[in-house]
């Protein structure tokens, strides 16, 4: 029986530069949740971390609130794993039907509308499962549901393939970075976080539901290594934390729920290296950082923050590499609604990369990021040259390559470790000049035995530096 390979590639922990051609920069996309005009903006990430608006596509407009506008209120946004398709869900008060809008993304980040579909319920959140299937909340339908759709741009068509009940008020979803598991929260009367296994045919099976008791579970985020899940607690003034088991089920962390240092946490996002949880707050409109214990997942707030402005003006938080992005949906303080870019420093503090940048739209909210294949953001004056590494292809089925760039000539050591940290394969390399190189790996251990499917770490060491990449090793097709 052939396995259907659909898992999205795991991101590298270090930056990657392609061997050929100058890569496109990272692009930040923002859904603008305006009542009178919905739109999606694209902004280029410059080498110094600043942002430049390069395109904006209007998804709907109306002269007054009395007129219907299914394309207004672009609320949540999600980018397909291949970086080619954006989808935004609209919460435009057109009950019982709402809209999903699909946009094609060019290499330079410019946008073109592909299709718009009317769907039942309010799509408060949207998450791509792979390049063809996406999960969408069907909110305010009693009971709420998570729905899986198949999108075919050649038609274009949108086909519902599954709908699973989630509770009385489901507004956020999260996809595990390596496992076929989807998470949904319920902040209604039966407050909880649920985990659904995704079958090869994209149907859903409930594998776990964890009650949150008297606390709300709002936005969800997973660590990049897939071992921890966090949820913002909103007006219950906590952040909830869960350990994620190998099957995707959840166990509350010791010390959870964690008390907040800000007012009404509404957004959570793990930094790219999983060292910090970035928390956005509704009432005091602050971005704060909390150090994550790598073993227990416990949170320790650093005391560092950035104040966006007035209550309710912080829209969303996202991170890529050493950068953090935050949307501000009000002109009340500085006359501009838009997006901030910050550098996340090793101690958890934030350094602004210039000032706020307008998205050109009304009420900027949700953020999606297409990461460049290269490190397009400068590390700052005097920063040492970095060792970089990647695994290609990723996921890996059979043989593949570990690619690495040496900042200077020297000896190289490459190790493959399993999820428990045990080194299972050594790849011997002679001294090499500075620049890009590659080493073949056949998915086997040092004894030549084929390793079981799972998540592995490829560690490249050179000149007292180390670069580590995750690789998802898939079982052979049968």
Image (tube, rainbow, N blue to C red):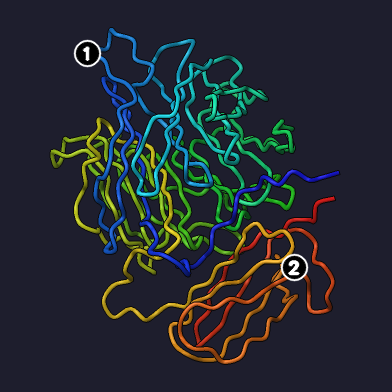
Q: How many marks?
A: 2
Look at the numbered disc 2 and give the secondary structure of its residue: loop
Q: Is residue 458 left or right of residue 60?
A: right
Would residue 426 be seen by someone viewing this image from the given angle? yes
Q: Secondary structure under badge 1? A: loop
- Tell me where residue 112 appears, x and y as whole percent: 37, 34
Kindly indicate whether the residue at mark 2 contacts the one at mark 1 (C-beta within 8 angstroms): no
Q: Residues within 10 Å of mark 1 (few under 14, many from 20)?
A: few
For the N terminus, which image quadrant?
top right
Residue at 49% x, 63% y: name it: 273
Question: In terms of depth relative to the viewer, which is nearer, 77 or 422?
Answer: 77
Mark 1 or mark 2, whichever is nearer to me: 2
Q: Disc 1 marks which residue? A: 63
Residue 443's label in the rendered image is: 2
Q: Quadrant of residue 375?
A: bottom left
Q: Name the foreground residue: 78 vs 303.
A: 78
- Residue 440 sits in quarter: bottom right
Q: Position of residue 390 (x, y in %)?
A: 55, 67
Q: Residues within 10 Å of mark 2 (few under 14, many from 20)?
A: many
Q: Relative to 160, is 250 above or below? A: below
Does 368 appear above or below 161?
below
Furthest toward the left, the residue is: 335
Image x and y of residue 161, in percent: 67, 25
- Residue in view at x 39 percent, y 69 percent: 346
> How far, Cα to Cα, is label 1 from label 2?
59 Å
Would residue 281 be visible to someone looking at this image? Answer: no
Name above or below for residue 300 compared with residue 260. below
Q: Is residue 145 left or right of residue 445?
A: left
């Amino acid at each position: 029986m052939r396995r259907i390979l659909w898992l999205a590639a795991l991101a590298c922990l270090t930056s990657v530069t392609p061997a050929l051609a100058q890569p496109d920069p990272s692009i930040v996309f923002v859904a603008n949740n305006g009542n009178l005009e919905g739109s999606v903006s694209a902004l280029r990430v410059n080498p110094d971390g600043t942002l430049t608006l390069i395109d904006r596509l209007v998804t709907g407009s109306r002269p007054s609130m009395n007129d219907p506008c299914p394309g207004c209120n672009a609320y949540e946004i999600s980018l397909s794993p291949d970086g080619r398709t954006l989808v935004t869900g609209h919460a435009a008060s057109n009950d019982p039907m709402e809209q999903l809008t699909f946009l094609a993304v060019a290499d330079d980040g410019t946008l073109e509308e592909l299709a718009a579909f009317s769907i039942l319920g309010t799509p408060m959140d949207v998450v791509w499962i792979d390049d063809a299937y996406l999960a969408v909340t069907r909110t305010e339908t009693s009971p709420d549901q998570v729905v899986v759709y198949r999108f075919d741009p050649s038609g274009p068509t949108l086909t519902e393939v599954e709908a699973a009940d989630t509770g009385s008020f489901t507004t956020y979803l999260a996809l595990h970075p390596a496992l076929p598991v989807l998470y949904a929260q319920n902040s209604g009367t039966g407050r909880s976080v649920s985990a659904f296994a995704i079958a090869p045919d994209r149907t859903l099976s409930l594998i776990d539901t964890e009650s949150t008791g008297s606390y709300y579970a709002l936005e969800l985020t997973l660590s990049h290594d897939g071992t921890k899940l966090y949820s913002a607690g909103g007006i219950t003034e906590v952040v909830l934390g869960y350990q994620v088991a190998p099957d995707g089920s959840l166990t509350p962390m010791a010390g959870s729920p964690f008390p907040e240092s800000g007012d009404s946490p509404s957004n959570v996002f793990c930094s790219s290296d999983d060292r910090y949880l970035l928390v956005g707050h509704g009432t005091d409109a602050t971005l704060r950082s909390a150090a994550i214990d790598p073993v227990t997942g416990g949170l320790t707030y650093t005391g560092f923050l950035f104040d966006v402005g007035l209550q309710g003006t912080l829209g969303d938080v996202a991170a890529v590499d050493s950068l953090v992005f935050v949307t501000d949906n009000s002109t009340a303080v500085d006359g501009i609604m838009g997006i901030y870019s910050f550098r996340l420093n090793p101690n958890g503090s934030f350094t602004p990369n210039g000032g706020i940048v307008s998205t050109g739209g009304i009420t900027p909210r949700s953020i999606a990021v297409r990461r460049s294949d290269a490190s397009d953001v400068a590390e700052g004056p005097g920063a040492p040259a970095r060792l970089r590494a990647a695994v290609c292809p990723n996921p890996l089925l059979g043989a593949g390559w570990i690619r690495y760039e040496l900042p200077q000539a020297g000896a190289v050591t490459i190790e493959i470790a399993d999820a428990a940290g045990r080194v299972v394969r050594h790849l011997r390399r002679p001294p090499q000049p500075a620049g890009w190189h590659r080493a073949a790996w056949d998915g086997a251990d040092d004894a030549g035995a084929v390793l079981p499917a799972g998540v592995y770490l490829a560690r490249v060491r050179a000149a007292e530096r180390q670069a580590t990449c995750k690789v998802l090793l898939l079982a052979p097709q049968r």
